[in-house]
Amino acid sequence: MLLALLIAVGMWYMVSVRDRLEAQVEVSLDYIGVPHNLMITEGLINKVVLRLRGSETLLRAVTRGNLVQAVDLSSIKKGTTIVPLAAEHLDARFRAFELIDVQPPRIVVKADNVMERSVPVRAVVESPLNSGALTVENVSVTPATVALRGPESIIADISHVPLIIMLDPKAAGTTVHRTIALDTPSLVTPSPASVKVQYTITSGRTVLTRRCKVMFVGGARRQYTVHPSEIDVLVEVPEALARNSRYLKEMEVSVAVPDIGPGESAKLPLHFRLPEGMTLLNPLSEEVTVTHSK
């Protein structure tokens, strides 16, 4: 028995007294017990930093794995609640050490009542082109109303959910069917999360031929010539913009300056920059001849 006592004292000395060190460890937080009628709006953090003092053996053992601490929020109320993170609130495995510091020593949680409310979905049609370039009719949204769930302070101020419908100018003259996800404020969840929309773009499209000058991109452009210097480009545009010179001038045709010596020539592909809503009908393989002046 005396030998067993001596061994026990020795082990206690090795674990609890000899080689006492300090260590700083990160502990991830898991939150449990949130009342079903409340929603946390602010204050939750992912981790805390503990500064511990204890034996080297125990410190090495506790820091080997991922440390997770459960935080019970069952006692929080609507409004602001201070949740302490002192030693008595930590798991038993940390009580084997002297807790020198916790950062942060507390978390300040803000909570609000959970509210559910049905509101209409309001379609907002937008176009990347000039106002009036595209005309739309028969816009429908299914379902027309959605259920929102979230903090009372936010839900109470929502009278409708805006649904932004960005038109595709190249879809002119067609009936479009799309599924669009709803965009709601943070912490607000819509049900369903997306709606189906249908609309008809009644404005049409027309085909034009544009004569464009071929421009150089990069390099000492004055030392080069291009043949042909102008080309005819066949494009399709929205009907409302067929006579809009400002819109049509946004189309550019260019060729890169080649790395060739004086007197040499090279055949190069053309590059087209088209404004929104314009479709190129010419074959994209068209080439021009670039010559480096002597």
Image (cartoon, rainbow, N blue to C red):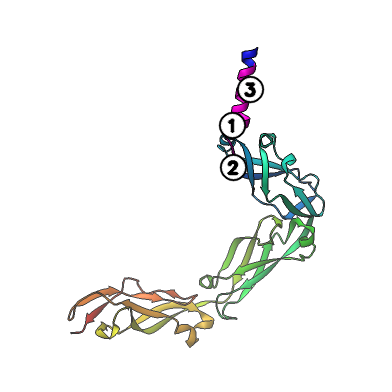
Q: Which residue is drawn at 37% across and 79% down?
A: 253
Q: Picture quarter containing residue 186?
A: bottom right
Task: Using the image as rendered, state which of residue 239 and residue 90 is in the foreground.
Answer: 90
Q: In this view, does 272 lie above or below 43?
A: below
Q: Badges 2 and 3: C-beta atoms under 8 Å apart?
A: no
Please name the residue that numbered disc 3 is placed on.
9
User: Where is mark 2, residue-wise?
Assistant: 23
Q: Nearer the viewer, residue 118 or 141?
A: 118
Percent from the top left, x then y, of residue 235?
42, 77
**Magenta region:** 5-24
| Residue type highlighted by circle 2 | Ala
Earlier sequence position, callout 2 versus callout 3:
3
Determine whether, in the image, residue 75 is placed left or right of residue 165. Answer: right
Please tell me in which quadrant of the rendered image residue 284 appears.
Answer: bottom left
Residue closer to the observer: 235 or 292 = 292
Picture coordinates of residue 239, whole percent (x, y): 52, 80
Residue 254 sits above or below residue 55 on the image: below
Residue that label 1 marks? 18
* Kind of residue at badge 3: Val
Magenta stretch holds residue 23:
yes
Compare marks 1 and 3 and give the one earlier in the sequence: 3
Counting residues from the start of the chain, the first of labels 2 and 1 encountered is 1
- For the residue carrying disc 1, how many other residues have a C-alpha within 10 Å: few (<14), some (14-19), or many (20+)? some
